[in-house]
Amino acid sequence: MSDDDLVFKALADPTRRRLLDLLFARDGRTLTELESEVEQMTRFGVMKHLRVLEEADLVITRRAGREKLHFLNPVPIQQIHNRWIDKYTEHRAAALLDLKTQLEES
């Protein structure tokens, strides 16, 4: 599976997106902290979602004593943006959108 596929697979799940949002809001959280923020999910379930995020390189972990801290790695998301989204916002796509808007207004 390619790196892009791993990132898309990780981002496809709403729970994993929620975990990324939590890490964006405050980086360096423990599993216990993340688990307390995700409703109706067991510790094991949160661990499985974090594993998928780690495999996609969206989450990086670091040990601090007995705790394992989780950090957001935004680089793969930026790479997806550059490769898949940016090209659709180029001049030609913007011109077509302008034309569509003008036609709908008339």
Image (spheres, rainbow, N blue to C red):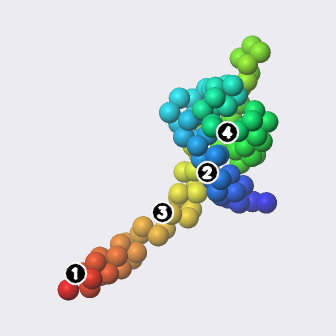
Near-viewer residue (44 or 67) = 44
Q: Secondary structure at mark 1?
A: helix
Q: With respect to residue 102, does 5 lie above or below?
A: above
Label 2 environment density (alpha carbons within 10 Å; few <14, some 14–19, many ≥20): few
Q: Earlier in the sequence, mark 4 or mark 2?
A: 2
Q: With respect to residue 11, does 30 lie above or below?
A: above
Q: Earlier in the sequence, mark 4 or mark 1?
A: 4
Label 4 environment density (alpha carbons within 10 Å; few <14, some 14–19, many ≥20): few
Mark linked to residue 86: 3
Residue at point 56% right, 64% down?
Answer: 84
Give the amino acid type for the residue marked by disc 2 in the picture: Pro
Q: Secondary structure at mark 4?
A: loop
Contact (Cβ within 8 Å) of mark 4 with mark 3: no
Q: Report how far apart the C-alphas of labels 4 and 3 lie in the structure.
A: 36 Å
Q: Nearer the viewer, mark 1 or mark 3?
A: 1
Mark linked to residue 14: 2
Quarter of the image for residue 33 reads top right
Q: With respect to residue 103, does 76 lie above or below?
A: above
Residue at point 48% right, 63% down?
Answer: 86
Q: Quadrant of the N terminus?
A: bottom right
Q: Earlier in the sequence, mark 4 or mark 3?
A: 4
Residue 32 image position (x, y, % from top left): 69, 25
Q: Report how far apart the C-alphas of labels 1 and 3 lie in the structure.
A: 27 Å
Residue 94 image position (x, y, % from top left): 35, 72
Contact (Cβ within 8 Å) of mark 1 with mark 3: no
Mark linked to residue 40: 4
Q: Report how far apart the C-alphas of labels 4 and 2 lie in the structure.
A: 13 Å
Q: Nearer the viewer, mark 2 or mark 1?
A: 2
Give the amino acid type for the residue marked by disc 1 in the picture: Glu
